[in-house]
Image: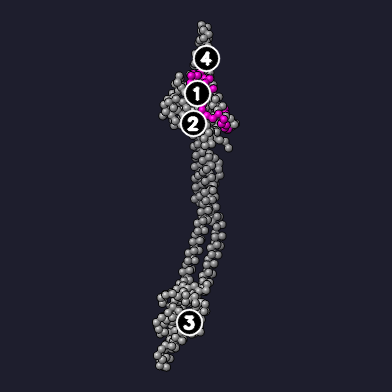
Amino acid sequence: MTTRAKYMIVKLLIAAGLTTGVIFALRYYIARQAKTEINVALNRAAEQVRTAIAAQEQLLQTTAETQHASEPSAILTSLRDSNWLQRTGELYACDVSVIERGRVVASSLSNSERDVLEQKLGNSPSGEILTIAIGGKRYQATSLPSLTAGPGWSIMVMKSWDEVEARQQKLSWILTFLAVAATLIGFPLVLQVSDTFGRPLSNLVGAVRALEAGDYNYPVMAHSHDELEEVTQAFEHMRASLQKSQKQLLQKERLATIGEMASSISHDLRHTLTTVVANAEFLAEEKNSEENKAAFYQEIRVAVEQMNDLIESLLEFSRGRERPRPVQVHPADVVERAIRIVKAKSGYQHIQFTEVGPEGLEWEIDPMKVERALVNLLVNACEVVPPETGRVEVLWGQRDGTLEFRVVDNGPGVVEEIRNELFQPFVSHGKAAGTGLGLAIVRKICEEHGGSAVLENSQPGRTVFCLTLPQRD
């Protein structure tokens, strides 16, 4: 998934989260407002009922005094009158119940609702506001003491949530609809605005990646007439400057490489040609015996072989990176041919060669190029091992989907000062005749196969070079 896609997803998630958060916050606010509203309406209704009952009690008390009554029987009869409670509830838009020691003795509610109310009363203190659910409906309720009727009596005023809940639900639906509509309309706008800024940035990122890959012609022009266009123009200037600097650097590197190559070649060829000329002069003398002539001829032949090797190395190095031509081969056969070529060179007949690896293993490689890489490593090893006790071992095998070759010798090891530059061209140490191209060619061949070449270990008596060639898809 691209960074732009991730960025878009994050923005959409943030927008959705904020919208959802706003909806929940508004619903919570509406719920709190609804509770405040129902409590205010309940208190108002309770105060009205309290005033009506007080007036009724005062009227009945006055009547009782006129009739010289000694008990508040008229007051109790009035409070037990459900019709009077019904009319009072309708007048003040509430329900009124008379409670005697936890029992509902009269109420504007139906009989079934009265029974449920009586079960839910418990020991709620007078004056406390309660939320009571009866028959699927919610009520906000509070108790008023009836001082005239005597202790244990109270008046419960109940306000239904129906009207408030209907209004609350309507507002919630409106808010939800507005939030969904804002989301459906806002997301395309967000996408459009994001594309307005994101597309040039994405194009600029693509240009940076193209520049990293060496492509200096990736189009990045922006016509936004803002800071983004300034950034794009600055990038264009930087890219042009880098391209110019790279061309100059490549030209200098080419000249330096040509100079270094000419210096190395001239020295090696001059040395080899001197040997050829000197031995040719000796060979031309008539007094030389047949044995001396054969020795001089052999010296000339060795010198010519050295010049051929030098020219072949230069050609291999100057070809640039080529696609290998892989075929299915046995690595054991490639190792055997490389050792046979090296053993045929003069001076290496006394070195002990060892081959270790699975004979039946098959791999898809370019056998000629891999053989050349092994020959270079073997020649380097043969040049540094002791002439009479030299040992060179070639190991091969498969591990983690790669073919590995290891060339091990018992030479003195690679000196510390050239280990970091060992695979660079024209790096050589301790050799009378060497171009320093051998290991550079080895690395080049491995990289053409998608692999690598490394110095795995180097110490007196054991030096290990490792070549890794991955399986081709």
Looking at the image, is mark 1 or mark 3 earlier in the sequence?
A: 3
Q: Earlier in the sequence, mark 4 or mark 2?
A: 4
Tag 1 secondary structure:
strand
Q: Which mark is residue 353?
A: 1
Q: Mark 4 sits on what residue? A: 298
Camera-side residue of 337 and 74: 74
Is 443 contained in the magenta span?
no
Is residue 350 within the magenta segment?
Answer: yes
Q: Are marks 2 and 3 in contact (CB under 8 Å)?
A: no
Instruction: Name the mark on residue 466.
Output: 2
Q: Nearer the viewer, mark 2 or mark 3?
A: 3
SS label for mark 3 = strand
Nearer the observer, 66 or 116: 116
Label 1 crowd (10 A; few <14 / some 14-19 / many >=20): some
Per the model, the C-alpha gap separating discs 1 and 3 is 116 Å
* Disc with the residue nearer the chain's start (2 vs 3): 3
Residue positioned 47% across, 66% down in the render: 28
- Residue 251: % across, % down: 50, 32
Which callout, 1 or 2, points to the residue nearer the camera? 1
